[in-house]
Each structure stands twice: as C-alpha cells, then as structure tokens.
Amino acid sequence: MPEPEIAEIPILYRDEHFVAVHKPAGLLVHRNAHAGREPFLLQMLRDQLGQRLYPVHRLDRPTSGLMIMAFSSQTAHILALQFAGQEVGKTYLAVTRGFTPLQGLIDDPLKSDSGNLQEARTEFTRLATAEIPHPVGPNPTARYSLVRVSPKTGRTHQIRRHFAHIRHPLIGDVLRGDGRQNRFFREHFGVHRLLLASVELTFRHPEDNSPLTLTCPPAQELLDLFDRLGWSAAQPLWAPDSDNLRIP
C-alpha cells in the first residue's frame, strides 16, 4: 500500500484532557524498528498541536478512523484502563467478500503472540450488499457486504481474523484476505487499502466519568467507493451524528 501523503491530521474532538483524531490508513501510530524515517501519528500530532501526547489504545497501521491521544500520562492511564477492561464501545465499518449473514456473533478464541488461546468475540450487522457483473474468481459475479462491526474483546487483528474464519475476509487484507479480490479493487476501483475504519467510540470521560460518544466519518476514498457500490442509501445506518463531535 502506498504511504499516505498527509499535511495535517484531522481533529475530531479536543479538550484539556485528550484529543480525538482521524488516523489515515497506512499511517503508523508509533515508530517501530521497521519504520525507518517514515512519519508516524504520535510525532505528527505532537508537532501539529505543539504539546506532548500519550497513546491510549491501538489502531492497526492499515486501519483508518477514530484514535484517542491523552495530554497527560494520568489521563492516558485512566482511559487505557477502560479499554483494557473492555468497557469501551467500539464500532467499525468493513467491506467483506460475499454476502454475510444479516447479523451474527463470531465467538472464536484467538491465539496471542505467545501462543495462548484468548477469548475473542465480535458482533456484526450487515448494512448493505453489492453484486458486480465481473468474474472475480470462479463465479460469474462478485459479491460484497458492508458490515457494522463491534468487537467485544480487543485481540490483535481480531476483526480481520474473525471474518476470515467465517470465510468472509475483509477486502484489502493482504495476510488473510482473497488476493484476487484485493487485486480487483486495486485495478477496478483504485483502492489500495484495507477496507476497515473505526467510526465510533463510547466511553467515560476521564475527568467526571460522564458518558461520551465520539464519531468519525469514513475517509473520502471510502465514501466514494460506497457510492460506486450503490451503498449511499445505507448512510443513515452509519453516518456520524454531528452533535457528538464537540470541539471546544
């Protein structure tokens, strides 16, 4: 996937305790040993906002969408405890191969990096489908689903692994996906990314414990793709409520 060209990280919410941003697909959150000199979200935000930031949770490099960074280590700790305790409501949008069931719960343990099996549960609802008259693979047409996904646990690559397990891999997943479908989306739609986006987080504010829901619109390249697949009518089912995007 080409490295993203980013002038500025979009700010979705900000107060004196933390900031919520729209992380582009393909951007690392932290520098790692394999990243070289490429940009990463944490440093870009520090430069953009002119203050130190502390990560609160993970978002994989190929995934776009809602990401929270705290302005103090204490706030980061409070919020991280909510994520670790599975107290945060997380919602994603994904595009999968084939027509998924209308809704479901994928309850399949996943191995950790150390090889231990861990409980892993993912709920999903199918929002829309598309059938394209192109023989991608053995069938005369290609079928896809737009799904709203709510992981109930936080395992590494959980959404990608779970949908591959039920034989509806995410489009753009280079590790567990369908290479022919990924190539078709690159060549036919010009889409070179994983079709997975974090669109909503529900948690308690670290200062007063009040409930807070933050939302993030899908990236424009996803909106354009949804339009080409005829999914504009599904927008009310996932479009963010602007009242939730409070930027003091």
Image (spheres, helix red, strand yellow):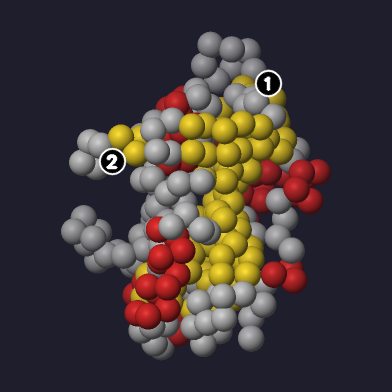
* Residue 186 appearing in the image: no
| Residue plotted at (52% across, 16% down) | 137
Q: CA distance from mark 2 to mark 1?
A: 40 Å
Q: Which image quadrant for residue 37?
A: bottom left
Q: Assign a secondary structure to mark 1.
A: loop
Q: Which of pointers 2 and 1 indicates the residue nearer the eye?
A: 2
- Residue 4 pos. (x, y %): 43, 59
In this figure, which residue is indicated by the disc labeled 1? 133
138 over 175 or under it: above or below: above
At label 2, counting other C-alpha atoms closer than 10 Å, the crowd grade (few under 14, some 14-19, many 20 or more) is few
Q: Nearer the viewer, residue 248 or 211?
A: 211
136 over 152 or under it: above or below: above
- Residue 208 pos. (x, y %): 57, 81
| Residue plotted at (37% across, 73% down) | 77
Q: Which image quadrant for residue 76?
A: bottom left
- The quadrant of the image that shows the C terminus is bottom right
Inspect the image, locate mark 2, and give the three-letter code of the amino acid beneath it: Ser
Q: Assign a secondary structure to mark 2.
A: loop
Q: Is residue 202 left or right of residue 175?
A: right
- Residue 187 pos. (x, y %): 52, 35
* Residue 39 appearing in the image: yes
In primary-sequence order, the first of circles 2 and 1 is 2
At label 1, counting other C-alpha atoms closer than 10 Å, the crowd grade (few under 14, some 14-19, many 20 or more) is few
Q: Nearer the viewer, residue 163 or 41?
A: 163
Inspect the image, locate mark 1, and give the three-letter code of the amino acid beneath it: Pro
Q: Which image quadrant for residue 157?
A: top left
| Residue plotted at (52% across, 32% down) | 106
In this figure, which residue is indicated by the disc labeled 2? 112
46 over 105 or under it: above or below: below
